[in-house]
Amino acid sequence: MQPLADKAAFVADSVYRNLIKPANRKLQPADFALLKRATRMEMIEVHAARKIFGELKTDSTCTAKGLLDSVKKGNVYLQYYPFDRDKNKFDEFAIRIGDVRHCSGSELYFFKGDKIIAKQDGYGRDDEDLEYFKNTDGEAIVYQLSEFDNGSGIWWNNYFFYKYDDDKLIPVLNEPESCNAQAFWEFRILWLESKIQQTNPLTIKMVYHQQFYNDNNDVYFNYGPIFLNDSTSIEYRWDESSKTLRGQYQQSKLNKAQILSYYLTDNDYLFINSHYKLLKAVLADKKQRPWLLDYLNKVKNYYNH
């Protein structure tokens, strides 16, 4: 089953692992002091921004329009994200550069003291604000939502978690925040929503259901009974050897493969294998059996086409 799980996870996991790039730029004391003053103003002079962050993106595309306008005026907008209750500590924090009130495409810089340790391109107005909590070792874990699909009757968003590890920012956990596909988007109707219940230890509650349907009359969708409707809470503990937040899936109702089967990818084989016991029970139910057989037939025809 692991190859099927790896295939389902590939797209989201690739984005998660490459979204934030490592950086290594130490600020001069005067520049660091200037940056700290600029966080209060939410604006910094262009020449100072270029000295601290390097060349700014000022092309004529929409994704840089807000930044271009602010550069013309001699200043660049910035937003300060402190990852500590003491906002004046300036130990672990991030700076967002650009006017995201008008266009996407801002740049996000992560700091460890006076050193830029990581950078994220394309942080825009539609992105959720960064959130954080402190790990058991006292270092910050930062998280945000990343969108993979959005539309009428379909959406897919994941939580991406990154942790300060001395002077690096490392990926430590990637879990779905919401997955939804209604009739015709997938061969089955699926819905999952997650909510962070607490951060010490990190605990995520997942609510989910699945349902079969068919469109045999080519006009209206026929909906079968919901065959899975449940919720579970998963605790994640810091594992120093792997430097990840490890889900305690054995203590929940969902294992990792079952969670991945909610991703909006061609993962029906993963769903069938990871829910084998459930589908075996559905097959034994005379009312639900036709719906399952119709689903299995669709999957067979699609993947063998």
Image: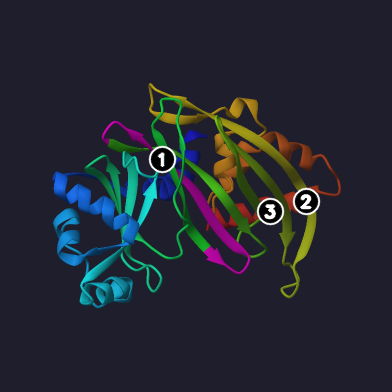
SS label for mark 2: strand
Q: How many marks?
A: 3
Q: Amino acid at mark 3?
A: Tyr
Q: Residue at x 73, y 59 (%)?
A: 213
Q: Is residue 158 magenta?
A: yes
41 or 275, nearer to the observer? 41
Q: Residue at x 39, y 50 (%)?
A: 81
- Magenta segment boundaries in residue numbering: 150-167
Q: Amino acid at mark 1?
A: Asp
Q: Which circle's residue, 2 or 1, is located before the other in the chain?
A: 1
Q: Is 274 on the left-hand or right-hand side of 209?
A: left
Mark 1 or 3: the one toward you: 1
- Identify the mark at residue 86; answer none if there is no mark: 1
- Identify the mark at residue 295; answer none if there is no mark: 3
Q: Circle 2 sits on which residue?
A: 226
Which is the main secondary structure of the residues drawn in magenta? Answer: strand
Asked which quadrant contains residue 184, the reply is: bottom right
Q: Is 160 on the left-hand or right-hand side of 165?
A: right
Q: Amino acid at mark 2?
A: Ile
Mark 3 surroundings: few (<14), some (14-19) or many (≥20) residues within 10 A: some
Looking at the image, is 296 positioned above or below residue 171? below
Marks 2 and 3, how far apart at CA: 14 Å
